[in-house]
């Protein structure tokens, strides 16, 4: 787990190690243990290392394999690297390290661009071919690891975070109208390849990109979950699906124990993270370190779920750590949290993950987390209504419960200079129209699992944990588990209020009090209601000269939200005022 950066030149100039060094300075929190740079004529790769697998210097990066003529920088973890090593040794390869990093180099040499199909894990990497001058980029199937890039006719720069590219040199920071529309409408999700800036793009999940020495690029999607079902799959009983998910999830959790350092768990007290703890116990893990965070109550909304996480901690005798954050600490560290965001992240729990990660990083370097279960196993309230929705009404039903505002309100909120077309609606409609998910609920599950999940919860966890040099692993996003879940008939997923199959797996393992509890949302009430000093903070941010000069939002709309923030809550219980405040806040923290 690390941070990567680099520069490719398409002209006759040499790539700048000075530029790459500057980028690595921004990435230091992602990899506090070591730094490395490789420069050769028109390419320069940089790496910040967090030591997790093979702690020796043999695993240092950039990794150079002179015999094969390949240079690699890699961020992530390959869980099946030992099995791949055995397979590659059988093909005649020899190894100078015991790292998952070197596995990628050999796999690329053996299988070319198809190497990604052999990798189980989370990854973003770049490989330079000495003999051809080409550079190959890849991102994991569920987009757990990020990869941003910016380019012009003369060069291309890439990095593990967007702010790193902002510090690397001239970047077009004009607001991208399509990204702004998605941010304001599609629940703050900005799908790849867009970012909020016209001059920075991100490689989509499950995508490879080959860059030729002259700058020509070719992207290829190598994976997509299939929600179509055979007759045999439709005939399977609920019990058979429950057995299959139990086995697959246990394997996913086991895979994510691969490390040369201890592995803990972020324990929210909900079904998903509690299941991870229970399965680790089934696998024989003892004295597991678990971590929970809670906040002050606001407006009769409870700010912590300790009573549920305590049940799991006591049941499995974990070494449990409860972190309570009062509002003063929340406000003190909010700017640091915002600066740690690669892109604006509106969800209230982002500050929770930031402060939780700070505490966890003092105890362990790797944690497993429960993100992804709701999207993969249909745990959200908008899925059951999709069961009876006619295909022609799939978009309207979905957008009615998920979108923060319709296009009419968007036009009221945003300066007309940023309005071109309804990009958010077009994106969702186009995604729904893709083959492989015929039922409306399957369309929604596919969209949420491969798009929303990537650019909201997963990105949030990656950014906030890596801000403290902490590696987060997400077993619910094991790609084989996701493939299995896609085949489960939707009626089994949404039964009894949703996530039925997963709950039934849970009944075999963890206490029922955690399974049958009301659904929690890791609340941070102070950022939802924006009262008192938090409302003052919002007013100050939106009244800065930079915000007025940027003119993203219409002043009448801003004043309406400031005058009555509690009257303007999104269908998913978010604050519309915090949404526009956070975008300006983030831009200002980036020095723009």
Image: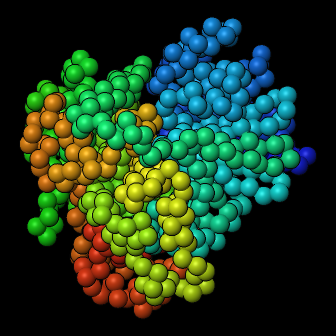
Between 510 and 154, the one nearer to me in the picture: 510
Residue appearing at x 59%, y 61% in the figure: 194
Q: Which quadrant of the view contains residue 61?
A: top right
Residue appearing at x 35%, y 25% in the figure: 251
549 versus 452 height, above or below: below
Between 248 and 535, the one nearer to me in the picture: 248
Between 92 and 297, the one nearer to me in the picture: 92
**Residue 174: percent from the left, percent from the top?**
64, 71
**Residue 218: percent from the left, percent from the top?**
74, 47
Residue appearing at x 57%, y 26% in the figure: 118
**Residue 226: percent from the left, percent from the top?**
48, 44
Quadrant containing the C terminus is bottom right
Q: Is residue 227 left or right of residue 351?
A: right
390 versus 34 height, above or below: below
Q: Is residue 142 left or right of residue 95?
A: left
Q: Which quadrant of the view contains residue 522?
A: bottom left
Specify whether residue 468 is in view. Answer: no
Q: Is residue 272 left or right of residue 591?
A: left
Specify whether residue 280 is in view. Answer: yes
**Residue 489: percent from the left, percent from the top?**
33, 46
Residue appearing at x 55%, y 28% in the figure: 119
Colour setting: rainbow
């Amino acid at each position: 787990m690390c941070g990567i950066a680099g520069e490719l030149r398409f002209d006759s100039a040499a790539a700048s190690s000075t530029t790459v060094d500057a980028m690595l300075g921004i990435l230091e929190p992602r990899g506090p243990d070591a730094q490395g740079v490789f420069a050769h004529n028109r390419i320069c790769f940089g790496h910040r290392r967090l030591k997790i697998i093979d702690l020796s210097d043999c695993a240092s990066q950039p990794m150079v394999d002179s015999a094969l003529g390949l240079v690699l920088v890699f961020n992530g973890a390959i869980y099946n690297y030992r099995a791949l090593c055995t397979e590659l040794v059988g093909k005649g390869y020899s190894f100078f390290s015991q790292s998952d990093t070197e596995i990628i180099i050999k796999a690329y040499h053996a299988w070319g661009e198809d190497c990604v199909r052999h990798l189980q894990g989370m990854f973003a990497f770049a490989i330079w071919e000495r003999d051809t001058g080409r550079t190959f980029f890849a991102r994991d199937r569920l987009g757990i690891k990020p990869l941003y890039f910016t380019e012009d006719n003369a060069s291309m720069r890439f990095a593990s975070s967007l702010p790193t590219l902002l510090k690397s040199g001239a970047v077009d920071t004009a607001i991208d109208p399509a990204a702004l529309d998605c941010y304001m409408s599609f629940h703050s999700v900005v799908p790849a390849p867009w970012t909020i800036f016209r001059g920075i793009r991100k490689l989509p999940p499950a995508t490879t990109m080959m860059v030729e020495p002259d700058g020509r690029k070719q992207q290829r999607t190598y994976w997509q979950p299939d929600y179509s079902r055979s007759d045999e799959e439709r005939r399977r009983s609920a019990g058979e699906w429950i057995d299959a998910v139990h086995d697959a999830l246990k394997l996913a959790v086991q895979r994510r124990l691969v490390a040369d350092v201890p592995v803990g768990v972020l324990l929210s007290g909900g079904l998903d993270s509690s299941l991870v703890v229970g399965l680790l116990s089934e696998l024989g893990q003892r004295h597991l370190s678990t971590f929970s965070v809670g906040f002050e109550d606001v407006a009769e909304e409870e700010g912590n779920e300790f009573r549920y996480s305590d049940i799991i901690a006591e049941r499995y005798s974990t070494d449990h750590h409860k972190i309570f954050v009062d509002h003063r600490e929340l406000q003190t560290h909010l700017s640091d949290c915002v600066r740690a965001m690669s892109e604006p992240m509106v969800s209230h729990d982002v500050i929770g993950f930031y402060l939780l990660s700070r505490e966890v990083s003092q105890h362990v370097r790797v944690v497993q987390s429960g993100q992804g279960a709701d999207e993969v196993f249909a745990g959200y309230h908008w899925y059951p209504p999709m069961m009876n929705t006619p295909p022609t009404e799939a978009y309207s039903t979905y957008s009615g419960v998920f979108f923060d505002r319709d296009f009419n309100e968007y036009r009221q909120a945003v300066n007309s200079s940023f309005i071109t077309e309804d990009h958010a609606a077009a994106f969702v409609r186009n995604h729904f129209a893709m083959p492989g998910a015929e039922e409306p609920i399957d369309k929604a599950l596919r969209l949420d699992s491969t798009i929303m999940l990537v650019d909201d919860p997963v990105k949030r966890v990656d950014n906030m944990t890596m801000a403290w040099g902490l590696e987060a692993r997400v077993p619910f996003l094991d790609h084989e588990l996701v493939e299995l879940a896609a085949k489960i008939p939707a009626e089994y997923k949404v039964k009894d209020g949703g996530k039925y199959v997963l709950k039934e797996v849970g009944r075999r393992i963890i206490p029922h009090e955690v399974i049958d509890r009301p659904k929690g949302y890791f609340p941070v009430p102070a950022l939802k209601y924006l009262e008192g000093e938090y409302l003052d903070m919002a007013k100050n941010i939106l009244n800065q000269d930079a915000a007025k000069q940027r003119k993203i939002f219409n002043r009448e709309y801003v004043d309406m939200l400031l005058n009555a923030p509690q009257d303007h809550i999104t269908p998913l219980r978010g604050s519309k005022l915090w949404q526009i405040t956070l975008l300006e806040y983030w831009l200002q923290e980036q020095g723009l």
